Amino acid sequence: MSVMIKEPALSEAEMIAEAEKALADISRIKDAVGKVIFGQESVIERTLVAILAGGHALLVGVPGLAKTKLVETLGVVLGLDGRRIQFTPDLMPSDILGSEVMEQDEKGKRSFRFIPGPIFAQLLMADEINRASPRTQSALLQSMQEYHVTVAGQRHDLPAPFHVLATQNPLEQEGTYPLPEAQLDRFLMQIDILYPELSAERRILLETTGVDEAKPESVLTAERLRAVQKLIRRMPVPESVVEAILALVRSARPGQGNDETDRHVSWGPGPRASQALTLCARARALYDGRLAPSVDDVYALAEPVLQHRMALTFAARAEGMTVRDVVARLVKAAG
């Protein structure tokens, strides 16, 4: 049994035909990104899953792990209009959203004209997002959820598709401002970037320190990406996957009958986490060449989807536990 969520159903033949075209596109995307970014297959997969699902992602890793290069590469490969904002403590909301300026015509008549900021892009890279003040960080809230901004009482729609890929350095905490929980919840996934494997690092040394370096090539258009995203939203979700998502997310909330969660978790994920898991499971299934998600997709994506939507109790932090540890235990208990 499968359930659909507000999308018109496609016939089996139409679904297969559309999926085959999407799989060919995804294969070309993988090849194009793999020519520039070496190793980090899990990071590339999760970032692409977030984009294919139509959401935003927070990339967390120490300096030098190609976070910026990955975002720039994806912008070119996917054919998106990309912009980059370097977040600093003195960055103002108007530096992101844009502002109105007063102009005077030849007759002396004065009027205001809106000058769009860098947020009016299809792929926005928010570099070191936690270095800006909470006031500036909040400038992204409305855009990430509603896909438009309001300046001087006027609504301005953002381009479609619109994605935010933000980076964050987990080491240097001096002079940074932790992202508020409401903004973290807008990110579909938090993707932790680890050091590359030995073979990948060897290839990095050999292929990036010479005269010629691989450059990304566009293999998709924004219109085609939107078509793939629409297809993903039409994919059927088996009832077993829906139940697994509900059980997992609800088990991560205190007061739901899970003793371990009650001891270790201060607050847990809301319904937006369930929505994110559903979309990401669909996208991961298509990424792997399947027409419907499985329970394994849910468990594989539990960590990046849930970890930034939970907080530990003081006792759990004192014991040296991390949110990732709690999520891993919940997945193991569910599986």
Image (spheres, rainbow, N blue to C red):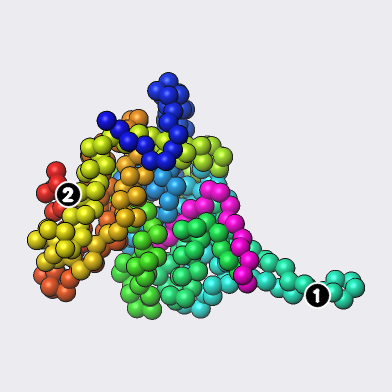
Measured as percent of width and height from the top left, residue 152 is found at 63, 72
Whether tag 1 and tag 2 are in contact, CB under 8 A, the answer is no
Measured as percent of width and height from the top left, residue 92 is found at 54, 75
Near-viewer residue (174 or 215): 174
Dot 1 lies on which element?
strand
Residue that mark 2 sits on: 331
- For the point 49% across and 63% down, which residue is it? 142
Give the extent of the magenta segment: 152-168
* Neighbourhood count class around disc 2 (C-alpha, 10 Å): few under 14, some 14–19, many 20 upward: some
Q: Is residue 29 visible?
A: no
Residue 75: mark:
none
Q: Is residue 185 magenta?
A: no
Q: Is residue 26 left or right of residue 155?
A: left
* Residue kind at label 1, given as amino acid type: Arg
* Residue kind at label 2, given as amino acid type: Val
Q: Is residue 160 magenta?
A: yes
> Going by the picture, which residue comes out furthest to the top?
13
Q: Identify the image quadrant of the N terminus.
A: top left
Measured as percent of width and height from the top left, residue 45 is found at 35, 43
- For the point 50% across and 69% down, which residue is it? 139
Q: Earlier in the sequence, mark 1 or mark 2?
A: 1
Dot 2 lies on which element?
helix
- For the point 12% across and 73% down, which residue is it? 315
Near-viewer residue (103 or 66): 103
Q: Identify the image quadrant of the C terminus.
A: top left
Find the distance from the CA under tag 1 to the CA under tag 2: 61 Å
Q: Is residue 69 left or right of residue 44?
A: right
Residue 110: mark:
1
Q: Is residue 62 visible?
A: yes
* Neighbourhood count class around disc 1 (C-alpha, 10 Å): few under 14, some 14–19, many 20 upward: few
Q: Quadrant of residue 251?
A: bottom left
